Image: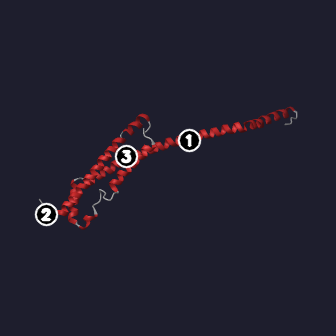
Amino acid sequence: MSLPEETLLARYAYSQALSRSTALSALEVSLDEYLNSMAQLPQSLMKTGKPGMGRTALIKKLGELMKFRQGLNLNRENFSDVPDFYWAEPELERLFNSMSDALDVKERTTSVNDKITYASEAQSVLRQLLTESSTHSMELIIIALIAVEVVIALIRDGPELWEMVAGKDERKYADDKGDLVLS
C-alpha cells in the first residue's frame, strides 16, 4: 500500500508534532520522577529542621533540574517554537500547529515549566539553609581560633603582663606609705 506523494509533507508535519509530543511526554515522566525524589525534603524539614541532603547531593539535584529546563526550552528543537521549516509553508505550519494544539503541547510545556519553577524555588530555599548552616559552622570555628590565639598569648606573655600589673600595684602601695621601692 502506497500513500499519495502529495500528502508526504502533511504526514511529515503530523509525525513531527507527534514526535515532539512524545519527547515532551518523556521529559514529563523524568520530571515527575525527579519531583518524587525531592518529595521527602519538605517533610524532613518539617520534622527535623534539616533538609536530609548534603551540599553535594543538593548541587547534583540542582544540575538535574537545570538539565530539565534546558531540555524543555533551549534544545535545538524546543517545545514552544514552530520549526523553521514550516515558516515557508503556511499550510504545513497550520497542520503542525493543529496537531500540536490537539496534543496540548503548549499547555503541557507551560505546566512542566511551572513544575520546574516550583522545584527551583524549593531548591533555592534548601541552598540558603545549607549556606546558613555552613556560615554558622565557620563562625564557630573562627571564634574557637580566636580563643586559642588568646590562650596562647596569655601563656606566652602572661607572666610579663602579670608582672607589669602586679608590679605597678606594689610600687603604688609602697609610695602611699612613703617608702621608696625600687624595681
Q: Is residue 100 visible?
A: no
Which residue is tagged 1? 139
Which residue is tagged 3? 119
User: Residue drawn at (36%, 49%), measured in percent from left and top?
Assistant: 117
Left or right: 143 as drawn, with respect to 58: right
Whichever of labels 1 and 2 marks the residue nearer the N terminus, that label is 2
Instruction: Name the secondary structure under disc 1.
Output: helix
Instruction: Name the secondary structure under disc 3.
Output: helix
Image coords of residue 166 (percent x, y):
77, 34
Which residue is tagged 2? 4
Q: Quadrant of the N terminus?
A: bottom left
The label nearer to you, 2 versus 3, is 2
Q: Which residue lies furthest to the left in this view?
A: 1
Instruction: Say which amino acid is labelled 2.
Output: Pro
Left or right: 152 as drawn, with respect to 28: right
User: Residue drawn at (59%, 41%), measured in percent from left and top?
Assistant: 142
The label nearer to you, 1 versus 2, is 2
User: Residue drawn at (37%, 38%), measured in percent from left and top?
Assistant: 40
Q: Residue furthest bottom?
A: 88
Q: Are marks 1 and 3 in contact (CB under 8 Å)?
A: no
Q: In which quarter of the image is the C terminus?
A: top right
- Label 2 crowd bin: few (<14), some (14–19), many (20+), radius 10 Å: few
